[in-house]
Image (spheres, rainbow, N blue to C red):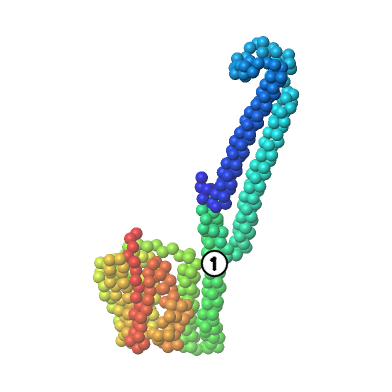
Amino acid sequence: MEFLYEKEARRYVLFLTVFWGLLVGAALFAAKWQAEGTKRVLLEREQEIASALLLSDIAPGVIAGAYRNREITAEGITFMEKTGWSAQSEPWLLPVVGENAAFFRHLVAGLAAVMGGLLLGGSILFLQKREKMYREVEKEIAAFADGDFSARLDRGEEGTFHRMLRRIDELSLALQTKGEAARSARQALQDAVSDISHQLKTPMAALTMYAEILLEEADRPCAVQMFAQKSLQSLERMESLLLTLLKVMRLDAGGLVFVKERCKVSDLIGRAISQLQERAREEGKRILQEGRAEDVLCCDLLWTAEAVSNLVKNALDHTQEGGTIRIGWQGFPHMLRLWVEDDGCGIAEEDIPHIFKRFYRSRNASDRQGVGLGLALAKSILEGQGGILSVESVPGEGALFTVMFPLTEL
């Protein structure tokens, strides 16, 4: 009976209930009218018979006794048959009975026509409203198919039909979300291609120039060695750039699934800085760690180590000789805080809202090899696992990057 939750269905059921009540009332009226008519016909007939008997000088007592009699005898039946009145006699033989029967037939036919008209009219009205509703729904579904998701089918009503409309609305929202995701993916691909082509121009131009110099200075071994080394550096930069861009694109496209596992935070930090300790020593800088050795974190070890490594690289890039980079962590009941702090040049206030954007480089940037992808990649990796990356900085006093990780179990 869920259809009764629908407003139009309730109206139609109410109409049928009223119609049924009128039909029953009409039938009772007709039955009562027929009974009254039969009573009137019989009374008139008896009055006619009594009048005839009195005119024939039959004693009133005899006539009264005849009317009180309830016994039917064979002689009586035979007498009536001889006069032409029997069970097989046609009603029209009695004019009053025939007139009464004809009126009753006309009355029943009229009531049937009126009631049938009401039922047909009410049903047609109900079906017309349903048809109008179906056409509106069809029109809006066609709009969904054409990519227009501005309409909504759900009117907040109850019932099976409206529940189906809500499901269609949910499907349209899913299609809209998927379409927007597809458009975002296409735009991200276009942006990535544009970024790659833009960022490769400089090293490609340098390689072209080095190749021309090598051709011209082929008889000078020192020049050949120097520009060959520069060519290798440009190729390494191109390789690093392409690999980083591919990683960012995989994250943007949702094609990367993080495989989480329990690991010690100290092991994570050790993996993150294993390739950076030598650079720090060559540049006269220190990388220090502080935190409890027993603290653990549930994360994708390889990708999270790369994100932390990018934070440390950024700190090294912006720290002068003799500077210190501190990596620390602290566990809480439901969260782990990890930070990378340096005492370098810091970040200008106007740059802080933009430093996690791809290819963004501050006008005060001291590094010449970075292209502005490390922090963007770190943010995507960390936040893709439920972490929150933030930064605080005072120009001239260094920067503090903080990651808040929820402590989830496998």
- Location of the C terminus (image quadrant): bottom left
Where is residue 354 drawn, in percent x and y? 44, 80
Residue that appears at 60% across and 61% down: 144
Residue closest to the eye, 217 or 73: 73
- Where 56 sits versus 135, above or below? above
Residue closest to the eye, 168 or 345: 168
Residue that appears at 33% across and 69% down: 268
Residue closest to the eye, 383 or 164: 164
- Where 199 sits versus 133, above or below? below
Quarter assignment of residue 345:
bottom left
The amino acid pointed to by label 1 is Glu
Number of other residues with Cα within 10 Å of mark 1, as a class: few under 14, some 14 to 19, many 20 or more: few
Instruction: Evaluate whether residue 210 shows in this view.
Output: yes
Left or right position of 407 against 253? left
Which residue in the structure is indicated by mark 1? 180
Instruction: Evaluate whether residue 283 shows in this view.
Output: no
Residue closest to the eye, 30 or 390: 30
Left or right position of 47 against 347? right
Quarter assignment of residue 291:
bottom left
Residue that appears at 43% across and 73% down: 377
Left or right position of 103 against 311? right
- What element does badge 1 sit on? helix
Quarter assignment of residue 96:
top right
